Image (cartoon, coloured by chain):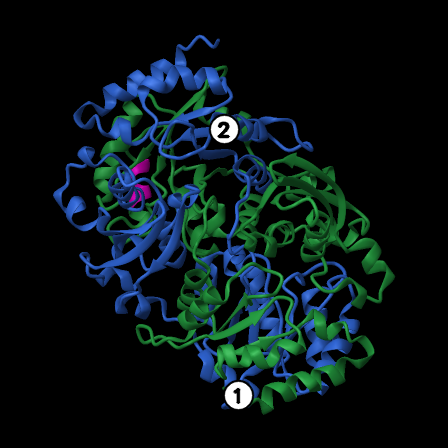
Chain colours: A green, B blue
Amino acid sequence: MPYRSLDMTARFTATYRIRSDAASIGARAEAIAVEQSVEMPVPAIAEQEILQDILGRVEGIEDRGGGVFEVRVGLATATTGLEAGQFLNMVFGNTSLHEDVVLLDVDIPADLAAAFGGPNSGIDGMRRRAGAFGRALACSALKPQGVPPARLAQLAEQFARGGIDFIKDDHGLADQAYSPFADRVAAIASAIGRTRYVPSLSGDLDQMRRQIDAAQTHGIDTVLIAPMIAGWSNVQTLVRGHPDIAFFAHPTMGGAARIAPDLLIGKLFRLLGADAVIFPNHGGRFGYTPETCRRLADQARTPHGGIRPSVPVPAGGMTLERVPEMLDFYGPDAMLLIGGSLLAARDRLTEQTVAFTQLVAQHNYR
Amino acid sequence: MPYRSLDMTARFTATYRIRSDAASIGARAEAIAVEQSVEMPVPAIAEQEILQDILGRVEGIEDRGGGVFEVRVGLATATTGLEAGQFLNMVFGNTSLHEDVVLLDVDIPADLAAAFGGPNSGIDGMRRRAGAFGRALACSALKPQGVPPARLAQLAEQFARGGIDFIKDDHGLADQAYSPFADRVAAIASAIGRTRYVPSLSGDLDQMRRQIDAAQTHGIDTVLIAPMIAGWSNVQTLVRGHPDIAFFAHPTMGGAARIAPDLLIGKLFRLLGADAVIFPNHGGRFGYTPETCRRLADQARTPHGGIRPSVPVPAGGMTLERVPEMLDFYGPDAMLLIGGSLLAARDRLTEQTVAFTQLVAQHNYR
């Protein structure tokens, strides 16, 4: 575990583009620095080394005009654990929930670059695969999904005869009944000679590993993966564990636009199996409206295709004062989550927790 | 593999909210139905059963006023393979790259609900864990990251004495040097009696499984997971494989706002290890500007912390006519990807591929 020897004072810079008025940009910037690091009220932090080494630091604010600002925040490298999913979590995680913030840039210092490692093959390795130097590479895609492997192999063979360098699966080709991965790879690999076929990985880490193994038995050394769906930690593991494989990244779910929060968090996370779904309550640190929160809670609890209801867990800057109102708003089939404002009680943490749990236990629902 | 017996004609409905003018909404709706299913020119599809059973179908368009429309699209259930990551890919994947489209709703028919299964425990199971019926549940969070396990355990003990139902890790707590998962779980579990501690899972599927195992040895039966970071397939696998564990879903990276495409696809996918990064070229099906595409290609190739360059792969509705212009724009360290427009040649696929590869091989760069 390389991070155990990590310099605990190392930082890297993330840049956010924020729509804001000039009067509040300073506070917005500080709020992001807190959100993406300690995620609690700073005055409640007693430990000097946390304030020094862990708390995010606003490094600069630039007015880009038209109510747009760019804010640079120095984040502690140690908080990423040098692990790709946690890196994403620390760089944009909760702040992605603000619809007026775009993650614009991340400076990758040498320690981060070395820890993640980047491409195994890169441009040179891709050229070697294609035997193509000093010119651009050419690629096409196998479609549509729904046709059987034999038909895809026929298309691949035509592409190969046309001299293409790489033939990739359409990213919709996964492991469906009509074109199982193993059958597809076998059929296509035998149809294309030395042309590079790039099958699309899908499923969980185990399935993707099995798919790479299956591909390798057919001499395939290049695959397609969608990081926003596969999960960054799994991509990191597959890349580092397969130095001889080259990876195409597909941008699907690249997040240029939104999924309605009630759908994503209330309905789809429940479908996925979440027993409790945490979400930012209205009037807290995030911009969800009461209507969004009500719909989200409804989506989590309404009878739906025979699956169990999930507990809605409103959170995000909640305080004891808001407990009665939240209980009336969400009803008893809910869980209230209060973090930072309890921790701010410091020595009186237990007493404040008692106050919280008594409010919850003794409430008379309207 | 349950999907092998799937009804190949089953569909489910996804609803998208689109900013558009009235004159083009019909075409936009059809384009989404194609993008989220066959992803190629419909006239190039010869197979009648693909047009019948796989191609997405616009089921309705409603004008919500103010240049906003809601479009319902029927997607073939078979294309999801009943696999969570592929489900997300089919529901929003490439369409997420359009910044004027929001995924608004997905109707979950009984076959999908049964296949995914939803929560193992749900509200009832969470109540049983807390021994709390007829009232809301109460939860708090352990923060800040950076403090050692002993300090977190001390906070947890105070929460527990205050009578709280669930104590969750801050979602920033992963497996960092300053608070390794195993040490943290051991310390906290022994400090809280019968109160439920909810540790946060992070890392790849193997790491998350080990974390669940470690938690279970301390009697823990509830964990926190972030589906947008863990990867939906992995969440599905963990939920289904651990019927006795209850799962909190954390909304981090819930995608309410954007990551700049050049950063995400050009720089960060490269850092993650992509040897080639596919992205929508300007002037194609997606809205990226030439400037965004140029920055993205630069991010993929510029010397950076000693990691290898990635091949930029512009794609998304490209044609042979655009090859010379694209070669001049991206230079030779690039890969051109042309899919649907080659496949539209049908019987002349090989010849059109030859034309493509010759354009690439014989180009005189400006």
Residue under pointer 1 = B135
Relative horizontal placement of residue A137, taking residue A77 as reference (left or right): left
Tell me whether the residue at label 1 lies in contact with that at label 2, contact meaning CB atoms closer than 8 angstroms. Answer: no
In this picture, which residue range is highlighted in magenta?
A184-189
**Residue A199 drawn above or below residue B145:** above
Q: Quadrant of the N terminus of chain A?
A: bottom right
Residue A186 on the magenta span: yes
Viewer can see residue B88: yes
Name the amino acid type tagged 1: Arg
Q: Estimate the x, y position of residue B118 in percent, counting from the top left.
A: 39, 71
Res. A222 image quadrant? top left
In this view of the protein, which residue sits in the foreground, B121 or A82? Answer: B121
Q: Estimate the x, y position of residue A278 in percent, counting from the top left.
A: 54, 68
- Letter of the chain that mark 2 sits on in the rendering: B
Q: Earlier in the sequence, mark 1 or mark 2?
A: 1
Residue appearing at x 43%, y 22% in the figure: A137
Q: Secondary structure at mark 1?
A: loop
In this view of the protein, which residue sits in the foreground, B33 or A200? Answer: B33
Relative horizontal placement of residue B47, taking residue B250 as reference (left or right): left
Q: Main secondary structure of the magenta part?
A: helix
Name the amino acid type tagged 2: Cys
Residue under pointer 2 = B293
